[in-house]
Image (cartoon, rainbow, N blue to C red):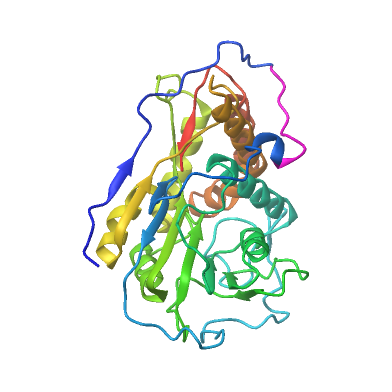
Amino acid sequence: MANVPATTRDAAQNIEADPDVSTNTKWRLPTDVTDACPSSTTHPTPVLGMMCMCLCTIGVFSAPGELNQPFNRSRYTASLTSSIERYPIENGRRYHAFKDGSYIMPNDESELDRLDLSHQMFKITMGDRLYLAPIGKPARILDVGTGTGIWAIEMGDDFPDSEILGTDLSPTQPTWVPANVKFEVDDAEENWTFRHKFDFVHCRYLAAAISDWKKLVRQCFEATEPGGYTEFQDYSLRVYSEDGSLTPEHAVRKWNDLGCGACDSFGKDPEPGPKFEEWMKDAGFVDVYHERFRLPIGPWPKDKHLKTVGAWNLVTLEEGLEGMTLRLLTQVLGWKAEEVKVLLANVRKDFRDSKIHAQLDL
């Protein structure tokens, strides 16, 4: 199939702030995700694409795979032994044991809860969808960096005839899952040696976790069946405002600059979202589609949908502040844990200040 020029969709105008939201306004998340999502299960016909938090959904045309081969473990895949579950503890947080130090985020219960909150926020942001690619009925699906496994599990329910494999550095996924869902401990940055290809490869929320994104994108391409799809959903973790309400004097800006700088010095790109379109074309993908989604921090927008997204984003960020900051600032920049916690207290104040119209891109 001929290479089709990629298209990029972006919001036409800045987000309008809601004048009725005050700093002291109390917000809660819906008790049920459906409270915040469209009630209809009918969605517009999706298009090929990449999303910039960045979601990348792409059409792939590559060499034939071995579709009928059973699931295979790469030589780097670890067995679920006691050593993998011998988790190190730092500053009261639990971290991965497999490839210890290669990932900045913890894997304790607080972090797992936050990942599930982030999953719901992603769905709400995307119109109650798990993906954007027009995947049809895929025989095999790969979820790279599956985390708690919630995306793979929901896909298993939606596609009972598909085989779904989720990989991650930690065996923190539940035991009771759909019969067609399987999890393996594996490092996505090592060479992949699957003996079969996948009809749909899904990779999200790995900003500040990957050293060589071009290699990962290339391996996704090589693992995708001809005519299949790969979709990236990831951030640019740079916090910004469109109206100048976030200034260099704010604690949020200081925290964000320190964190992104530490990620860069650690060799983990905190802003992969806007770069996927180029990386995917370079890897050989065609029909690459890129879409940017704005994630307000807090319920300050006037738009009802963005207000809901902002409320969810505020909760996920506040829940994850310690986890996403402690290891970076203490190990990479040499801060003391007490200093980090003082900074984060001020960051939380800024997050809840409705006069600061901060946001991220997905």
Q: Is residue 63 above or below residue 118?
A: below
Residue visible at 65% across and 83% down?
79
Q: Nearer the viewer, residue 1 or 5?
A: 1
Residue visible at 62% across and 45% down?
41
- Asked if residue 30 lies in the magenta stretch, the reply is yes
Q: Give the range drawn in magenta.
A: 25-33
- Magenta-drawn stretch, dominant element (helix, strand or loop): loop
Drawn side of residue 298 relative to residue 9, left or right: right
- Asked if residue 124 lies in the magenta stretch, the reply is no
Image quadrant in which the N terminus is located: bottom left
Q: Position of residue 78 (x, y in %)?
A: 60, 81
Residue 85's quadrant in the figure?
bottom right
Residue visible at 49% across and 49% down?
333
Q: Where is residue 86 in the image (x, y as percent from the top left)?
A: 71, 73
Q: Is residue 158 above or below residue 71?
A: above
Q: Position of residue 51 (x, y in %)?
A: 42, 48
| Residue 271 visible in this rendered orientation of the protein | no
Q: Is residue 16 above or below residue 120?
A: above
Drawn side of residue 138 relative to residue 241, left or right: right
